Amino acid sequence: MDKQKSNDKGQFKSNFGFLMAAVGSAVGLGNLWGFPYKMGNGGGFAFLILYLLMAIFIGYPCMLGEFSIGRKGQKAAIGSYEKLDKRFTFNGWIATIVPFFLLTFYCVLGGYVLKYLLANIGDIFGAGWGVNGADSGTYFGAFVGSGAPALIFTAIYIIVTVLIVMGGVSGGIEKFCTIAMPGLAILLIITVIRSCTLPGAAEGLEFIFKPNFEVFKGTGWITVLASAGGQIFFSLSLASACMIVYGSYLDKKENLEKNAILVPIMDTTVALLAALATIPATFAAGMEPAAGPGMLFVTLQTVFNSMGSAGPIFGTIFYLLVLFAALTSSIGMLEGAVSAFMDRAIDKGKKPSRAKISWSIIAITTIGSIIVAIDALGAGPLPKPFGLGTWLDAFDLFAEGFMMPGGCLIMTIILGWIHPNYIDDEVRHSSGYKSKAFVNFCLKWIAPIFLVFILVGQMNSFFAFGWF
């Protein structure tokens, strides 16, 4: 019966399609502007060391755990956690609620990307709707605070996301990701080559890779750990329902160990390439990297403007790859929620309507997107929430700040202490589970300790408590 329920929602046709969808969900805006800036701000190579350690000791075990919970449960996060242990069904709800918060600002940023893609295409053809050499900061501020135009581009991005998810697992998500992810890789490599060959790019490479362990002094390592940890969860889409859902769509013969290793490796590779594509170009233009949207839309557009006639071409390539990355992530977020409510319909003996559920969920998140768009990254008329600078920060606080690391902490306690052998038979369906001792040790001891530090660091970072 469980197998039939999974088929009612769809399945991946190939392991490659599953891998591209999982990597696509992991690779997103966080890789393309969050990782480069956080890496530089966290001491370059020092941040990278912590990030890689967490990818190994948290990313791989937790990714394997979520894939296994999903494939064994044959349901989305809520149903799979209920099957694991009814006492922890609430953790499935936590994971399912996360996409509601993430999509509120992700779709707005996706709309910004779409606007800049079209603007750079306009510059190629000399159209009036291009950037036309305008000051990047002024141009960005005018668009973000434009009201209706910003909302329109957000709406277009939302509609594209929903249409892909409505296409189903193999016909929509898998088909799009198997095209978008290889395309993203090609475009990213082209951008890296151009960025690293610009005059003055060496300073940017030094900014990224030169070891700087000064940031570890005192309690500074906790700040860097929290930054790298938050990046791990946001980047790998852990504890956001997506990986459990994708695991439930994977055939029993596919190797979970291999896939759980490949997703973090490929995601980290893209993150490093993103750093090479952005930071050297930023320094070559004589600018300092800025956090968040400022780097993606102001700093880099200034770099493209400085390239002369070639600028719009590279701008178009760059924002197209960012659009691919954003869409593959947002469809994974939406599917995590859609699949959970399809399960509920199936459990009631009804045939679920993917379209109806998709539009219902996106209607709720669109309310948040409107708030984020009107807030204009803190420049709008809305009151500041919870003492934070923007509504984007507020939604991100609940998702990346608390619910994702908190939900993952609960999962490690379940799999490490309460049901330590729960995923063993599922992993062994397709492999010898050679990493069992390592995974068990990480889930029981390493990951929970790291996650506590990450949660404390996130609280300190968001609210500036000054604890360290």
Image (cartoon, helix red, strand yellow):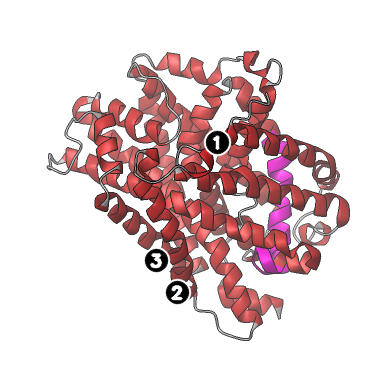
Q: Quadrant of residue 457?
A: top right
Residue 98 vs residue 143: left or right?
right
Viewer-closest of 22 and 389: 389
Q: Is 328 placed above or below 358 here? A: above
Is tag 2's residue or tag 3's residue first in the polypeptide sequence?
A: 3
Helix, strand or loop status at disc 2: helix
Q: CA distance from mark 3 to mark 1?
A: 29 Å
* Mark 1 crowd level (few <14, some 14–19, many ≥20, 10 Å Cα): some
What predominant SS class does the magenta segment belong to? helix
Asked which secondary structure carries label 1, the reply is helix
Residue at label 2? Answer: 355
Nearest-to-viewer mark from 3 and 1: 3
Q: Residue at x 51, y 51 (%)?
A: 102
> Between marks 2 and 3, how big is the CA–CA gap?
8 Å
User: Dot 3 corresponds to which residue?
Assistant: 163
Q: Which mark is residue 269?
A: 1
Q: Distance of mark 1 from mark 2, alpha carbons?
A: 35 Å
Q: Residue at x 51, y 61 (%)?
A: 334
